[in-house]
């Protein structure tokens, strides 16, 4: 298929009239280096505490639910209460990440927590969030050995543990954090509320193929920043 | 799919008297149009972002070879493969070869307009591979053996009763007495039925809303989560994308994403926006073992440097069709191929030939709404006019722009609506009448009597539905 490749590239170059000299390519190369940002909406122009509030407000309008807790120690109780409230089993399939493993799950012996990917039989998945974007109430999830992607999509309920210090204004801040953390992961999932569809007579239904519920446990560690 | 764009006028005539379709189109106005306006009103920077989005694509198209080569390099560096395909046939063969390499029996599919463009499902089926659409709308039309009628809401023309009928006929293992009256029950049934398909599939095929040159990533934007299940669970992930989907950086994609969902459904951001880069990494517990990008040209590179280059900025948001009075009257199937509405009227003749689709650029009142709402500021009326002139020059112009006349007849019988739409009507008349005086010699009366025989439309008037929808502006 290298014929096809050459021919397509030749057609493109012909349309431009020539092969494109070094200076021409330098413009594009520079753009890749600069990673210039477009207009950032004014709504994210605010301090860290107000960004957290904006994130929560936006997430709620997307039909996510949010619990604000003071520290990682408070997470097991918050999760257990959420599951009881929603009439869900007290069994979690969780991402094997240091951050999630460090949560004192044993404080709540009634909660069963196992770690690993989902095989499609888990009712509740629990993952960390790499970051969150206040602009639209969007979670930014990064795949890796410590965060299997199946946990984001297969379980009926997705519980996400998010540190307030990881909340940024626009998507671009999320990319900056991701680049600082290393190479582009296999998957970056931006998640805005639970799964939904309007494919039947334009009426919105939650829980199309992905999770029916998205619950965010927000750890208020904002001062640590 | 077999294109029926040639019969646009007949298609349109049937569409105008189909009560289910007319109801669905009214719902579309109430939903997409109103929601988009609200989303735009909430973002004061919207118009500025549109200018920037246009500039990003213009720059990218100007340096397309550079960015495509960089994209390929980055995909390869991440352990993936790029397959360059000049034609639909080359793309089909590339996909089949990948499927055969793992002896695939079933393939799940996320929504992909390129998949429709190259008719991949039929091809795979003909080669003994079952293809299962997983987007609910696509699943419904697959069961009905229909093409999509809208680029983001493929089953927008189907009523819930019709969906229920398809489900009763297809899901034979379930209790025949079950109730499927409500959308909730239908969604739950599709969810349950498709679950196993995701887990069983050997290959998952998705489209791409963007390709990122900087990182070699492909991007899908969905609400259901089906695309993510499709690409995460099978052994192989194949991305089908046309080459103009490329943008330079993650920042550039972010700028365009700000206008995409707002223009499409009126959401600020879709539920799932996923950036995929290569196959499963060392230590990963899930994800596909292979990652392939089937990069399709299919005539697009030939548009570069021509008057039609602007259509390559299209991000397939659907806003132009949602706001189009012609699409709103006849729906998507009338356009006879995979891309309907104003963007389809420009793209279809490009992809399947002016001869096959010479009516489509006439399916316009030149009211200009499509260009007003297009997030990428594509001058759609100008591009349609370009095709009309080309078709005229090549002697392909139909004896009369019959559709325009049919619509005018429909409007003219409704004085109130006519008054509202007087500006529109005037343009229709102009279109039906004369362009540079050359139609005056054409036999007007024959066309007129033909369309007087058109059956009277059933159900509510256009105007009532318009009011229910709260108006379009
Ligand atoms: S032409 Fe513009 S409005 Fe129409 S689908 Fe493309 S980007 Fe959207």
Image (spheres, helix red, strand yellow):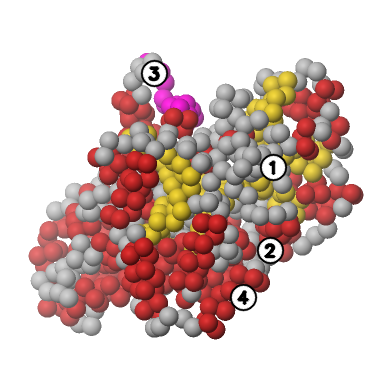
Q: Where is A166 relative to B430, above or below?
A: above
Task: Say if mark 4 contacts mark 3, CB within 8 Å.
Answer: no
Query: Viewed as shown, does residue A123 lie left or right of B139?
Result: right
Q: CA distance from mark 3 to mark 1?
A: 36 Å
Disc ID at residue A41: 2
Query: Viewed as shown, does residue A105 lie left or right of B462?
Result: right
Residue segment shown in magenta: B177-196
Q: CA distance from mark 1 to mark 4?
A: 40 Å
Q: Circle 3 — which element?
A: loop
Query: Viewed as shown, does residue B58 lie left or right of A43?
Result: left
Can residue B37 be seen in this snapshot?
A: no
State which chain disc 1 sits on: A
Classify 10 Å Cα crowding around label 2: few (below 14), some (14-19), many (20 and above). some
Task: Say if mark 1 contacts mark 4, CB within 8 Å.
Answer: no
Q: Are marks 3 and 1 on the same chain?
A: no
Can residue A157 be seen in this snapshot?
A: yes
Disc ID at residue A30: 4
Task: Say if mark 2 contacts mark 1, CB within 8 Å.
Answer: no
State which chain disc 3 sits on: B
Per the image, is B50 magenta? no
Q: Which residue is drawn at the image coordinates 12% and 58% (left, top)?
A: B450
Disc ID at residue A72: none
Q: On the image, numbered disc 1 is attached to which residue?
A: A60
Image coordinates of residue B470 in percent, x first then y, are: 49, 53
Q: Are marks 2 and 1 on the same chain?
A: yes
- Viewer-closest of B196 and B381: B196
**Marked residue nearer the N-terminal end (1 or 4):** 4
Q: Are marks 2 and 4 on the same chain?
A: yes
Q: On the image, numbered disc 3 is attached to which residue?
A: B174
Foreground: disc 4 or disc 3:
4
Q: Are marks 1 and 4 on the same chain?
A: yes
- Viewer-closest of B144 and B108: B108
């Amino acid at each position: 298929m290298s014929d096809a490749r050459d021919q397509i590239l030749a057609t493109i170059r012909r349309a431009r009239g020539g092969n494109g000299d070094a200076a021409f390519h330098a413009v594009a190369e520079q753009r890749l280096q600069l990673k210039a940002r477009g207009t950032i909406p004014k709504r994210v122009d605010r301090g860290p505490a107000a960004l957290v509030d904006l994130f929560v407000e936006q997430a709620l309008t997307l039909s996510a639910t949010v619990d604000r807790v003071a520290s990682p120690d408070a997470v097991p109780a918050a999760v257990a209460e959420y599951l009881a409230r929603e009439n869900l089993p007290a069994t979690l399939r969780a991402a094997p990440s240091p951050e999630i493993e460090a949560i004192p799950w044993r404080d709540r012996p009634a909660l069963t927590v196992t770690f690993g990917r989902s095989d499609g039989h888990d009712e509740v998945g629990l993952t960390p969030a790499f970051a969150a974007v206040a602009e639209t109430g969007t979670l930014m999830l990064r795949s890796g050995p410590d965060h299997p992607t199946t946990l984001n999509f297969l379980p009926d309920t997705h519980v996400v543990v998010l540190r307030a210090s990881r909340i940024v204004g626009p998507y671009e801040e999320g990319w900056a954090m991701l680049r600082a953390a290393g190479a582009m992961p296999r998957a970056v999932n931006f998640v805005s509320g639970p799964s939904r569809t309007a494919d039947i007579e334009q009426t919105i239904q939650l829980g199309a193929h992905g999770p029916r519920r998205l619950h965010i446990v927000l750890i208020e560690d904002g001062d640590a920043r | 799919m077999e294109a029926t764009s040639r019969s646009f006028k007949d298609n349109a005539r049937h569409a105008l008297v189909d009560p289910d379709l007319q109801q669905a189109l009214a719902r579309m106005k109430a939903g997409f149009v109103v929601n988009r306006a609200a989303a735009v009103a909430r973002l004061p920077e919207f118009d500025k972002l549109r200018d920037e989005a246009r500039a990003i694509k213009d720059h990218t198209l100007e340096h397309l070879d550079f960015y495509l080569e960089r994209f390929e390099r980055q995909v390869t560096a991440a352990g993936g493969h790029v397959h360059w395909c000049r034609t639909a046939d080359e793309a089909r063969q590339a996909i089949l070869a990948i499927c055969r390499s793992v002896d695939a029996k079933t393939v799940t599919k996320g929504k992909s307009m390129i998949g429709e463009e190259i008719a991949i499902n039929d091809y795979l089926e003909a080669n003994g591979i079952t293809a299962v659409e997983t987007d609910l709308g696509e699943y419904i039309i697959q069961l009905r053996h229909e093409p999509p009628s809208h680029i983001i809401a493929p089953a927008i023309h189907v009523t819930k009763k019709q969906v229920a009928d398809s489900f009763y006929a297809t899901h034979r293992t379930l209790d025949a007495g079950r109730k499927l009256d409500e959308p909730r029950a239908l969604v739950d049934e599709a969810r349950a039925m498709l679950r196993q398909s995701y887990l069983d599939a050997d290959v998952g095929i998705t489209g791409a809303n963007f390709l990122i040159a900087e990182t070699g990533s492909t991007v899908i934007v969905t609400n259901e989560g089906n695309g993510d299940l499709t690409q995460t669970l099978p052994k192989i992930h194949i991305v089908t994308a046309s080459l103009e989907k490329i943008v330079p950086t993650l920042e550039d994609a972010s700028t365009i994403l700000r206008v995409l969902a707002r223009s499409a459904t009126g959401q600020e951001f879709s539920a799932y926006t996923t950036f995929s880069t290569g196959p499963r990494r060392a230590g990963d517990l899930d994800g596909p073992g292979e990652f392939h990008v089937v990069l399709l040209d299919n005539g697009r590179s030939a548009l570069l440097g021509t008057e039609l280059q602007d259509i390559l900025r299209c991000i397939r948001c659907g806003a132009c069709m949602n706001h189009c009075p012609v699409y709103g009257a006849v729906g998507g199937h009338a356009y006879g191929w995979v891309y309907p509405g104003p963007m389809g009227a420009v793209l279809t003749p490009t992809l399947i030939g002016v001869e096959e689709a010479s009516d489509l650029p006439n399916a316009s009142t030149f009211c200009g709404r499509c260009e007003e709402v297009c997030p990428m500021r594509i001058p759609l009326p100008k591009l349609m006019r370009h095709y009309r002139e080309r078709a005229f020059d090549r002697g392909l112009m139909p004896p009369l722009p019959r559709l325009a006349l049919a619509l005018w007849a429909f409007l003219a019988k409704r004085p109130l609506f006519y008054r509202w739409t007087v500006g529109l009507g005037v343009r229709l008349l102009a279109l039906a009448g004369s362009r540079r005086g050359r139609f005056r010699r054409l036999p007007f009366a024959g066309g007129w009597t033909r369309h007087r025989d058109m059956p009277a439309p059933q159900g509510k008037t256009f105007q009532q539905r318009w009011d229910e929808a709260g108006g379009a502006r």
